[in-house]
Amino acid sequence: MIYFDNNATTQLDPLVLQVMVPFLESQYGNPSSIYSFGRAAAKAVVTAREQVAALLRCEPSEIVFTSCGTESDNSAIQSALLIDPDRKHLVTSKVEHSAIIKHAEALARRGYEVTWLDVDSTGMINLNELESAIREDTAIVSLMWANNETGVLFPIEEAAEICRSKGTLFHTDAVQAVGKIDIDLGRVPISLLSLSGHKLHAPKGVAALYVNRRTKFNPYLLGGGQENKKRGGTENTASIVALGRAAELALVALKEANVRIKALRDRFEEGLLESVSSLQINGDRIRRLPNTSNLAIEGVDSEGMLMLLDQRGICCSAGSACTAGSLEPSHVLKAMGFSNDRARGSLRFSFSRFNSEAEVEQALQIIPNAVEKLRSMSRGFLAA
Ligand code: PLP
């Protein structure tokens, strides 16, 4: 199998698995217990917090472990709304992940007002529009750092600066960015940032929320006083330890691995641009993640292509999702102004440090053939 769907989830790094196993087997103490068996688990959580903080270049006390990126996103917004209940306005973009979109839509149904920023055909927001969208009663601005479908990187440093100058909380969903680009929270005035373990070779079901030390925070999950009273619930020690180790490895890999991953992605795109006619790259080609390639292939339907590639051993994602029995074109590609046909003919390939040049070369043999097969089938269908 060739796994080119690393924005969906990533393989667990064997080095990460290694450090988590003892906490599933023998070191099962509760980090809140005060005897030494519990304290050993608490110590491991402290180390993990330091490792995640090192990746983001922030203080360990600013890291709150959560259960998933979705929880981190939801808790960031809920906290902002509780801090100042008179602020009933939110700003976000039309291309966010559903963890933000569905939440903002639910809030809109409950009487909050949401400003949805547009993107242009390259997938980029307009900072002037952001600036004019912020009001006295804006509780929070939430913008993703990297888009999960196209890999497009929003100008987060500038957006954060605008929010700081206006005194508005700023949250970024950096679930796709962390571990793939260099992030220095010492330099960017971000109030809250979400990341998720399974996008950087840690297991699913563990994540973190960065809460700037000067940002007031209201916990989303109330319970025991875990996570410095910021998130109730017994810590998932094994997974937290894994996330810490994954962050440490991501920091080491950041420079070298990402140069290699970008070279794989660029070779992949170059090869397909040469061998497949009417193929276009979706999203800004420069300001995007080094690992993501979102391609519009004229005359193919991405679901059909996905299934054909699955049969031929390649995993990737389609630019449309099957919702309630119908093929819904991607909201991201639609927001970029693309037609339903272009969105329905788009596929996402996303790479990781576990992919190889040989896999890319193999895919470059398989994909053009699959495209030709689907195109000739649809020509036959139209002729019939
Ligand atoms: N935000 C973005 C940009 C994502 O890509 C994802 C996952 O695909 C999430 C949030 C949700 O993360 P999780 O799967 O950990 O809930």
Image (spheres, rainbow, N blue to C red):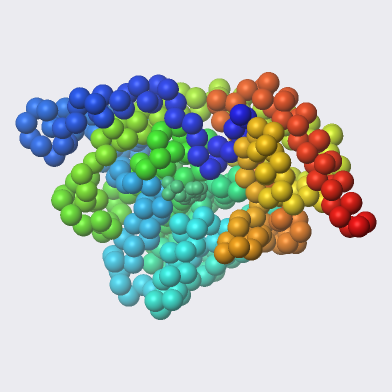
Q: Quadrant of residue 341?
A: bottom right
Q: Between residue 119 and residue 294, name the one nearer to us.
A: 294
Determine the residue positioned at 60% across, 58% down: 322
Determine the residue positioned at 62% across, 30% down: 2
Q: Position of residue 64 (x, y in %)?
A: 29, 45
In this view, the residue farthest toward the right is: 383
Q: Is residue 185 above or below residue 364?
A: below
Left or right, 165 with respect to 380, comes to left
Left or right, 169 with respect to 132, comes to left
Determine the residue positioned at 42% across, 56% down: 170
Q: Quadrant of the N terminus?
A: top right
Q: Position of residue 246 (x, y in %)?
A: 40, 29
Do we see residue 93 in this rendering?
yes
In this view, the residue farthest toward the left is: 35
Determine the residue positioned at 40% across, 40% down: 204
Do we see residue 244 in this rendering?
no
In this view, the residue farthest toward the front is: 384
Q: Between residue 304 and residue 219, name the one nearer to us.
A: 304
Left or right, 30 with respect to 135, comes to left
Q: Quadrant of the C terminus?
A: bottom right
Give the tally of numbered discs.
Answer: 0
Q: Is residue 140 above or below residue 175?
A: below
Q: Position of residue 363 (x, y in %)?
A: 72, 30
Q: Position of residue 269 (x, y in %)?
A: 74, 35
Q: Is residue 264 above or below residue 225?
A: above
